Image (cartoon, grey):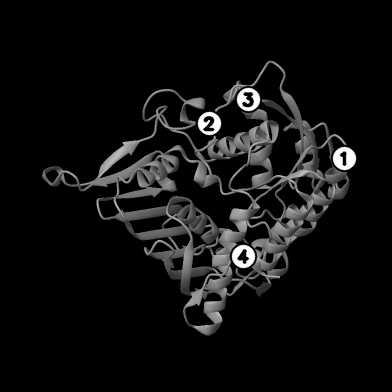
């Protein structure tokens, strides 16, 4: 898991790794910038990342891939990018429901594959992607980049060291405003045939991944979902992904959920609560957790990425939370800025994640989180979806054991 991989010292010869990026949207751009930045931040790596080919149907994005990001070539045919001889690893950053055919092609070509979450738009797609990678024997990674925050890694260390005692409760949330405007356009994230499910795939998956990383597997869930803005203006022309329409525009139906919440039990006996929304007003990117133990507690919020709140019950005369600021004493932080309380940001997490994945390819070590962990997350999602229909508690199954 993240935190087990440090900065390794390679020999004078670095293994070249040719990269294909499928889709130059927000995350495609983030991974492309990451490949450009890695040599500057991790000089002792065992590999050299090379931006070989970018595939995108949009001519403007293809031009940007070549002119601004420095890809050796561009194409509108993602299949040719996946199968190219000079490509070693494929980054899948297209809309969710395109992930499965892209992963299938990458596995068939014997390429290492890193997919943004979810690795499929539905739990079934994610399970099929995992099976393809297992059968092909290719290395995999999945984009739960928040796990790589240096202070999240420190939180895991504190939990595993016993500093919090026995963990009794976990609270996770991801509250975002990206869909809060009723005039926000009906783009792919709101459509089942392009995104699959809504916030349970898009952002609740990050909360579940964090919980499993920090305290363990979820065993049982019950929850609810709502589509709080049922109609949105239809996009036209070259409308941007987060563009807005006007009250007079024709509208279409939102096909997946805006809000999801769940209660759960963990394998270790702890209880948990989760909520995710893309239409709430106020929190802008609150991917946050609270962990409560018998001897202390922790809380972290991505909106304050460089702060970890810690309560220690060992000294009752000095009660209250202490704020731990990020700094170069924590894993990976010093690769970006020295000293204490000098901040890092979201794309630094992507760079840490991508470096660790590519380093694992060069050294042959196992990378985590990969498709195994992605299937564990969608196992929770499937149980949650089942509870929406049954309105009752559902056991979380290991989908990998299903025929």
Quadrant of the rendered image containing residue 386:
bottom right
Mark whose residue sits in front, 4 or 2: 2
Residue at image mark 1: 84
* Marks 4 and 3, the one that precedes in the sequence: 3
- How far apart marks 4 and 2 lie (CA) works out to 50 Å
> Residue at point 75% right, 46% down?
138
Residue 284 bears which disc, if any? none
Looking at the image, which is closer to me, 367 or 208?
A: 367
Element at label 1: loop
Q: In x, y percent, where is residue 82?
A: 83, 45
Element at label 4: loop
Residue at image mark 3: 45
Inspect this view and state whether residue 57 appears: no
- How far apart marks 4 and 1 lie (CA) works out to 44 Å
- How far apart marks 3 and 1 lie (CA) works out to 25 Å
- Dot 1 alpha-carbon crowd within 10 angstroms: few under 14, some 14 to 19, many 20 or more: some
Q: In x, y percent, where is residue 166?
A: 31, 55
């Amino acid at each position: 898991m993240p935190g087990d991989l440090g900065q390794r010292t390679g020999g004078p010869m670095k293994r070249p790794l040719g990269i294909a990026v499928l889709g130059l949207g927000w995350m495609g751009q983030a991974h492309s910038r990451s490949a450009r930045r890695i040599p500057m931040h991790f000089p002792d790596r065992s590999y050299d990342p090379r931006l070989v080919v970018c595939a995108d149907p949009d001519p403007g994005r293809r031009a940007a891939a070549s002119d601004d990001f420095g890809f050796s070539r561009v194409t509108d045919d993602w299949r040719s990018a996946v199968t190219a001889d000079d490509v070693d690893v494929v980054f899948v950053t297209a809309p969710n429901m395109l992930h499965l055919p892209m992963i299938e092609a990458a596995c068939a070509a014997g390429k290492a594959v890193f997919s943004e979450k979810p690795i499929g738009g539905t739990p079934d797609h994610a399970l099929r992607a995992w099976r393809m990678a297992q059968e092909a024997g290719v290395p995999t990674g999945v984009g739960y980049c928040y796990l790589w925050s240096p202070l999240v890694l420190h939180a895991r260390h504190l939990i595993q060291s016993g500093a919090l005692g026995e963990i009794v409760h976990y609270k996770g949330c991801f509250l975002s405003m990206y869909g809060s405007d009723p005039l926000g356009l009906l783009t792919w994230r709101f459509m089942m045939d392009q995104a699959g499910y809504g916030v349970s795939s898009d952002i609740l998956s990050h909360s579940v991944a964090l919980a499993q990383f920090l305290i363990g597997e979820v065993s049982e869930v019950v929850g609810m979902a709502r589509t709080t803005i049922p109609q949105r203006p239809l996009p036209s022309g070259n409308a941007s992904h987060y563009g807005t329409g006007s009250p007079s525009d024709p509208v279409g139906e939102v096909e997946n959920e805006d809000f999801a919440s769940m209660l759960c039990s963990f394998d270790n006996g702890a209880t948990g609560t989760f909520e995710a929304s893309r239409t709430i007003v106020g929190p802008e990117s609150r991917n946050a957790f609270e962990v409560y133990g018998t001897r202390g507690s922790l809380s972290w919020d991505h909106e304050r990425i460089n702060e970890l709140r810690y309560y220690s019950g060992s000294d009752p005369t000095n009660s209250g939370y202490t704020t731990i600021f990020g700094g170069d004493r924590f894993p990976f932080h010093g690769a970006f800025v020295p000293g204490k309380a000098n901040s890092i940001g979201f794309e630094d997490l992507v760079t840490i994640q991508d470096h660790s994945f590519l380093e694992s390819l060069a050294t042959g070590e196992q990378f985590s989180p990969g498709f195994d962990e992605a299937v564990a997350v969608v196992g929770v999602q499937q149980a949650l979806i089942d509870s929406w229909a049954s309105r009752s508690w559902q056991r979380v199954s290991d989908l990998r054991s299903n025929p």
